[in-house]
Amino acid sequence: MKINSMCFYLFLFCSLIYSQPKGDFHPQFSPDGKQILFYSYSSGNSEVYVMNVDGSGRKNITDHPSRDSNPAWLPTGDKIVFTSGRDGDNEIFVMNLDGSNIKQLTNNNIEDRYSSVSADGKMITFGSRRDGGDWEICTMNVDGTNQVQLTKNDVEDFHPRFSFDGEKISFNSVRSGTNSVYYFDVNGKNLRKVSDEIDPAGTPRFFINDEKMLFNSQVTGDYDIYMSDLYGNELTNLTKSAGNDFSVDVSPDGKHIVFMSDRNGSFQIFKAKIDGSDLQLLSN
Ligand SMILES: [Ca+2]
Ligand SMILES: [Ca+2]
Ligand SMILES: [Ca+2]
């Protein structure tokens, strides 16, 4: 089914923030490739989970009545950043992987969400509504100091991720009228759109050599996971499934992807080889 991309994204977006849909969301490989971090509403409210790459050992590491979501690894693999609404609105927090030593990094009365940590562990990029109602891309030091707003406009800019070398940030924006994949330098300069030909597209991340981009695109009907070069050339559909596939991540060795898909109804986490073969359902 071809659906209006922007409406679908905003629906997904708002439903994840304000309601409690079933499912597992936004998987990320650990720095050693052995575990997967994600969030889920499976226990009744949104919690951050970690599991082994085969789907075993699923563990709730937030276990808090508030909404906890959008986790990301620090490169040491023993800490994560995540989003929580435990102080009223969403803020970015950091904690140990066992749930101990929680520290709050943002503190305001607007939504802060969608974080990613640079490969050297020094910077966080995140989305924030601090400039009116729409989402902007921001950065801060990993201790929460030096918060900088990199985008300033009246449209949604969200899902920022650092490149592997830490010099660029990829993100979604609807600044051209439809959902599209962009990247710029960590100071917000040298904005580039990957290609009009892949639109509508989103939730991008650089591939391990930073010369390719992984993202979800709707070019063939519903959303599938694609890889292309940084100009949208050599476009390859990795999933080719019915249902919507979103939010891809790549293993540190570049050999596997994980992503979320609603092909079975609610969102579940799948793993596959980088060519899309050997598909495994990890959500139980
Ligand atoms: Ca919770
Ligand atoms: Ca906030
Ligand atoms: Ca914006």
Image: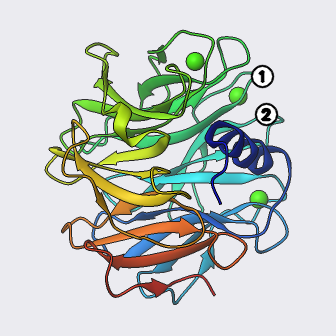
Applied colour scheme: rainbow
* 77 relative to 80 in the view: left or right: left
Determine whether the beta carbon of the residue marked 1 sits less than 8 angstroms from the nearest atom of ligand 2. Answer: yes
Q: Where is residue 276 in the image (x, y as percent from the top left)?
A: 32, 75
Determine whether the beta carbon of the residue marked 2 sits less than 8 angstroms from the nearest atom of ligand 2. Answer: yes
Residue at (70% x, 63% y) in the render: 47
* 255 relative to 14 in the view: left or right: left
Q: Which residue does the numbered mark 1 point to in the structure image?
A: 109
Q: Position of residue 5 (x, y in %)?
A: 62, 42
Which amino acid type corresponds to the residue marked 1 in the rendered image?
Asn
**Callouts 2 and 1 close, C-beta under 8 Å:** yes
Q: Position of residue 10 (x, y in %)?
A: 71, 39
Q: Which residue does the numbered mark 2 point to in the structure image?
A: 89
How many residues crowd mark 2 within 10 Å: few (<14), some (14–19), many (20+)?
A: some
Q: Quadrant of residue 265?
A: bottom right
* 23 relative to 137 in the view: left or right: right
Q: Quadrant of the C terminus?
A: bottom right
Which amino acid type corresponds to the residue marked 2 in the rendered image?
Asp
